[in-house]
Image (cartoon, grey):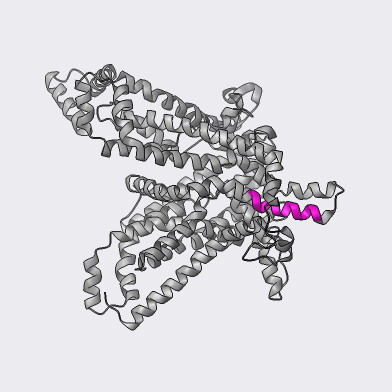
Amino acid sequence: MQNSTSDKMFSYVNIVLLSIIALLVLYPLYFVVSASFSNPIYILKGEMWLWPKGFNVESYTKVFENKDIVNGFLNTLKYTTIGTLINLIMTIMAAYPLSRKDFYGRNVIMAIFVFTMFFGGGLIPTYLLIRDLGMIDSFWVMVIPNAVAVWNIIIMRTFFQETIPLELQESAQIDGCGNIRILLKIVLPLSMPVIAVMILFYAVGHWNSYFQALIYLSDKEKFPLQLILREILIKGEMDEMIKATSETFLKQKLSVEGLKYAVLIVANLPMMMLYPFLQRYFVKGFMVGSIKG
Amino acid sequence: MEKIVENKHSIQFEILPAVEEVSPSKWTMLKKSFRKNWDLYLLISPVIIYFIVFHYLPMYGIQIAFKDFIATKGIWGSEWVGMKHFQRFFDSYYFWRLIKNTLGIGIYTLAVSFPIPIIIALMLNEVRNDKFKKFVQTVIYAPHFLSTVVIVGMLVLFLKPDGLINQAITLVGGNPVDFMTEPAWFKTMYVLSDVWQTMGWSSIIYLAALTAVDHSQHEAAMIDGASRLQRIWHINIPAIMPTIVILFILNAGSVMSVGFEKVFLMQNTLNMSASDVISTFVYRSGILDAQYSFSAAVGLFNSVINFIMLVMVNSIAKKINHTSLW
């Protein structure tokens, strides 16, 4: 490596700039964590900007005492597990036949799937269909209309094609093993890495989505966490509740302020715990998709 | 697979001289494959049914854009009215406001959100300390996994009149700004938060392209006395140019398809003049006001524009760079 002074200067400037960028990304995240453990009075006064001030976990107690948040959390958990399970099964059911070279018509079927990536009916015709199917306000509307993603079928099919040796499947066939048995006993056990990627892709999608619920759900009992978050953080429905009650204004304002930071943390807790896996597998899956796509 | 099929075709043609056409032989192929792999067809059929019901049936429903949809008469039974709904949309006073906002947000995002990941990838590529590089990557990828609600929720918390940003502004002697309700600030807040969330993740693809750069080129340039900036400019950037062009095509093709989710969350009655875009308008007039035919027409207008844009940008790219999507 050549080490002239200008190149060294370049390195320093580069590292300083990247550090600033990383700091700009990190600080808001860190601030939310810090604020959630602070006494809200210091946040509003602007005295808390780095370390938690007046350390306490009261905001978290408020979060877990809130019926809507707990209910939303449980709903999201349900939508995410059952939705991801359906996604996974449907993706395998599509990807395995499409990966088989002796599956006649696979190009036509693939084209039928891929076309929907570029063109669709749009919001209103889809809404009318869901309504006609009687799915509005049902549990299933959260998991069926998005039962499978074409992109993920492509990723999984590519994995099957490129990592499971064809000879292995053919020799099993000669031994009288049916297609379904080959899939269950040979292909799937060898495909755990891509199955892990799929579970993460779909689960993150379900956990973070609010659009489906916004359009198709009106029963608050069925709301996922993201819609409850929207009501608390963005629509400020709790702020309005303060004015309605008689308890001291400031005290209520403070507790709502603290709750907002704490609920952000609670909502993202599963993501944070999964982040090391997410980062590794998402980058991998993202690359497979973009190279083959 | 195609090769095998082709071969079998030609063999069959030789055996059966010119009596039958191609389609019957295709039919026999299908029958043969079906007999052997009937369980695979069974396996994939629920997925095919899913796509027909949830993706192709709505396409059939697009026709309500040209009809006066009445629920009791159904999609097919409703009366044709031609371009009436499109005409009403083009003539309405909010038409130009929607176009201006949709295009404005799209172009603003393209201009700012698109180049930053390229610069970050080029910078990360120059870092020799692997630990530092890993650390920066881990940090800047993280916001990608936050939901839109969380991102907008954080925006509201930080930008409200007594939030963190305004505390900082008053500290240096400025006047607090209510960013979330001020129409003039809407697009900037939208784009900056988008940069914050996506710049790290979007840089991955360029970083991957940079790993393919031939190291001997750099060595040769160093012998010729090229500085690091010169090498980035003359070796790295040309090397990732095809990736840049492809992604630019994809992004430019979607300037009119500004996503619903974030705009909708950031929207409020006070900033409507800057924040109302086609997708939020379709939601309001369609789902909330139940003007199904009219909003289906608006939605269709938007998707047709998007498709035309994609084709246009692609043909331009083809001429300039010989790189294109198809």
Please identify the quadrant where the C terminus of chain A is shown.
Answer: top left
Give how far across and how far down residue A176 sits, in percent.
Answer: 22, 18
Q: Which residues are magenta?
A: A251-263
The answer to whether B324 appears left or right of B98 in the picture is left
Q: Position of residue B110 (x, y in %)?
A: 49, 59
Q: Position of residue B153 (x, y in %)?
A: 64, 52
Residue closest to the eye, A186 or B161 = A186
**Snapshot quadrant of residue B284:** top right
In the rendered structure, does residue A256 fall within the stretch colored magenta? yes
Which quarter of the figure has residue B289?
A: top right
Q: Is residue B305 magenta?
A: no
Frontmost residue, B324 versus A281: A281
Against B35, residue A199 (above or below) is below
Above-or-below relation of B175 to A78 = below
Viewer-proximal residue among B224 and B256:
B224
Judge left or right: residue B169 versus residue B22: right
The one of B45 and B183 positioned closer to us in this rendering: B45
In this rendering, the answer to whether A134 lies above or below A219 is above
Is the stretch drawn in magenta largely helix, strand or loop?
helix
> What is the x, y in percent for residue A139?
59, 28
Q: From where the camera sits, is residue B83 visible?
A: no
Residue A168 appears in view: yes
Q: Residue at x 22, y 78 (%)?
A: B224
Q: Residue at x 38, y 25 (%)?
A: B44
Q: Which of the image's four quarters has the N terminus of chain A?
A: bottom left
Residue furthest out toward the bottom: A5
Q: In percent of the image, x 75 and y 52: which residue is there? A: A255
